[in-house]
Image (cartoon, rainbow, N blue to C red):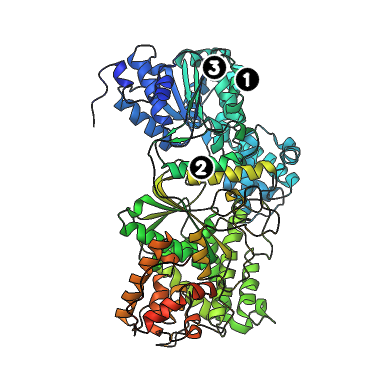
Amino acid sequence: MAPPPRDADAVLEGLDPEQREVATALHGPVCVLAGAGTGKTRAITHRIAYGVRAGILQPASVLAVTFTNRAAGEMRGRLRQLGAGGVQARTFHSAALRQLQFFWPRAVGGELPRLLERKVQLVSEAAARCRVRLDRNELRDVTGEIEWAKVTQTVPADYPAEVAKSRRDAPRDPAEIGQIYAMYEQLKRDRSVIDFEDVLLLAVGILQDRHDIADQIRAQYQHFVVDEYQDVSPLQQRLLELWLGDRESLCVVGDASQTIYSFTGATPDHLLNFRTRHPEATVVKLVRDYRSTSQVVHLANGLLSQARGRAAEHRLELISQRGAGPDPLYTEYADEPAEAEGTARRIRDLIAGGVPAGEIAVLYRINAQSEIYEQALADVGVPYQLRGAERFFERQEVRAAVAALRGAARFGGNDSILDDVVDLPSQVRAVLSTSGWTTTPPTGSGAVRDRWESLAALVRLAEDFVQAKETATLGDLVGELDERAAAQHAPTVQGVTLASLHAAKGLEWDAVCLVGLTEGMMPITYAKTDEQVEEERRLLYVGVTRARHHLSLSWALSRAPGGRASRRPTRFLNGLRPGSAAGPAAPGARSAGLAPAVSAERDGIGARRKRRGPALCRVCGKTLTDAGEMKLMRCEDCPSDMDEGLYERLRDWRAGQAKDLGQPAYCVFTDKTLMAIAEAVPGSDGELARIAGVGKRKLDRFGVDVLAICAGDEGVGGGAED
């Protein structure tokens, strides 16, 4: 560990002009507007350390507040390295709980009530007393609603009106939730327990009622720093005001463009109104982005340039300090399996090119999207780890659903649920309907929606499975699910990160793949108001700014192979991705255009695939369900009769085409398609067109060359057509 700076001036060494301005602004209110990757933690820790080393701030008089224990621990570590040990860096809850534990005997008497670690069980009991039945996921969502109500300082009687006023999607009837909320509060009082939100509420109550205690805390803490200020709730803001009293020794740091947790009660209003409340405040903007290349920053700035609303009015125009890098890669796929397969190939290529697997992330909108990427990465032998979610087959609702399907398969036609139900997908829907699956998704977000998405993924899997094997039974499907689950039960390893966009906040990677960027997923279907849509835009902005160097963005036109290409890429990329028109997408309108690289990829997949019978391995006869194996028309492990020399000639030709087109090689033809060509050795347009991965436009563009190479013409080389 490096020794701490020798004096106060040495603390300022290495800071850019704006960071230095933050570090030396030690008096009066200070507002730091810090964009993604601009070194805000560096700026505020050096500010505290400079004040301590200069003798202006006493370490014990400083309270730095952030939102996660990880961030607080990182801040404490940096302060120690800078010679400013002794400064308190805590979360709001940690600081408030510490004060409650100290002052409770004096303010109330006796010991502080026991802290309820998990409130779900008590909420369940409250619901039962109100004669409301909640399943596990509804229970989680109602618990979340109670937490939201408390941090927004909404009492039970006012909850229904507040939900209507905020246009919030409640998971149950608001009147019911209000009753459960009131009963929950009564049960807590009866049992002398408090929850985490009570920690803040009780701290606020004591500071409001006991001026002597408030004065003692204010004498202890005279200087406050609040990180991620765009995420404070009304309750946290009230506690901060009581800590401060009539003083203005406050430094807040935030970025309204990274407000993505409004559903939990967070609001950027306190950050945006800071100068109104503190007209004499020093305001410093950090816009030098040290994280991302100029290409990534350009896209991030472009996203926000189309934003609307208050947060957009205060957006920060980032300036990359890293210089140039590769352009973001935009790729349109025919279907979701193709998108997952293409993403896995890109990741494999990045790793082969020297990017560590741990420095790569695949980010999606909801956790239910993870399964197909788990499978695709496993298929190409790339290790991965999930962040913020269980593996798909380890989720409780998936385990329960598979168990229900296994039970139904065991009973066969004797199961009354399956009476008059013949085809496999309908059988799966019938069984899963008893576990909470419905034909239409629930409104709003939360655990109920997550659970429905997981069950819907199983329904889609059944639909895909029966397309590959028309005679498949429920037992066959259960066997397939067991095989998939077993393949993904390997110990957790350090590898590619799979995470939702929300879980990725505060993290960064060398390479980021943003996937599933279609209307209905980004923005999500239940984002209906202008404010909700703008938060979805900010969520995509957060995803983009996680990337240091490599960034890819992709979407699929249909869900399954052979499906109708009815999806549209997210409106947020209109005017930003090559070939697209600016402005919002009209409902039902198709995207205006695609980047050249995207057209080539789509041509290879989009114009073909008609519904056929089950795909069978031409070697062993086994039904094929893996997209890569279906391209080869054989199992991966079955012996290949591929002409190795032809395959290498095709690869050399493809490399020349890709270079001339300025595209990745797989945008001409994928490895699997080249292997299929080298195995089939087509001699005519018709034979070539029957190979998966060769669509009409690719046939028109590359068919003559490919057939010539297959015929042994050594004179065929690179050189793309215009």
Local crowd size for mark 1, using a 10 Å CA cut-off: few (<14), some (14–19), many (≥20) = few
Residue 257: x %, y % from top left? 55, 36
Which residue is labeled 3 in the image? 281
Residue 193: x %, y % from top left? 56, 36
Tell me the amino acid under the disc marked 2: Ala
Task: Determine whether label 1 and label 2 are within 8 Å by CB.
Answer: no
Task: Using residue 328 as the reference point, say whether residue 462 is left or right of it.
Answer: right
The residue drawn where x is 61% and y is 37% is 265
Which mark lies nearer to you, 1 or 2? 2
Label whose residue precedes the other's in the sequence (1 or 2): 1
Local crowd size for mark 3, using a 10 Å CA cut-off: few (<14), some (14–19), many (≥20) = some
Which mark lies nearer to you, 3 or 2? 2
Q: Is residue 443 visible?
A: yes
Which residue is labeled 1 in the image? 276
Q: Secondary structure at mark 2?
A: helix
Task: Using residue 346 as the reference point, say whether residue 645 is left or right of it.
Answer: left
Kindly indicate the quadrant of the structure image that contains residue 270: top right
Which residue is labeled 2 in the image? 300
Task: Determine whether label 1 and label 3 are within 8 Å by CB.
Answer: no
Task: Using residue 80 as the reference point, say whether residue 632 is left or right of it.
Answer: right
Decide which of 650, 417 is in the foreground and name it. 650
Q: State which quarter of the image contains the N terminus.
A: top left
Label whose residue precedes the other's in the sequence (3 or 2): 3
Label whose residue precedes the other's in the sequence (1 or 3): 1
Local crowd size for mark 2, using a 10 Å CA cut-off: few (<14), some (14–19), many (≥20) = many
Tell me the amino acid under the disc marked 3: Ala
The residue drawn where x is 71% and y is 39% is 166
Residue 516: x %, y % from top left? 54, 57
Between the residue at mark 1 and the residue at mark 3, the CA separation in whole angstroms equals 9 Å
Q: Secondary structure at mark 3?
A: loop
Tell me the amino acid under the disc marked 1: Thr
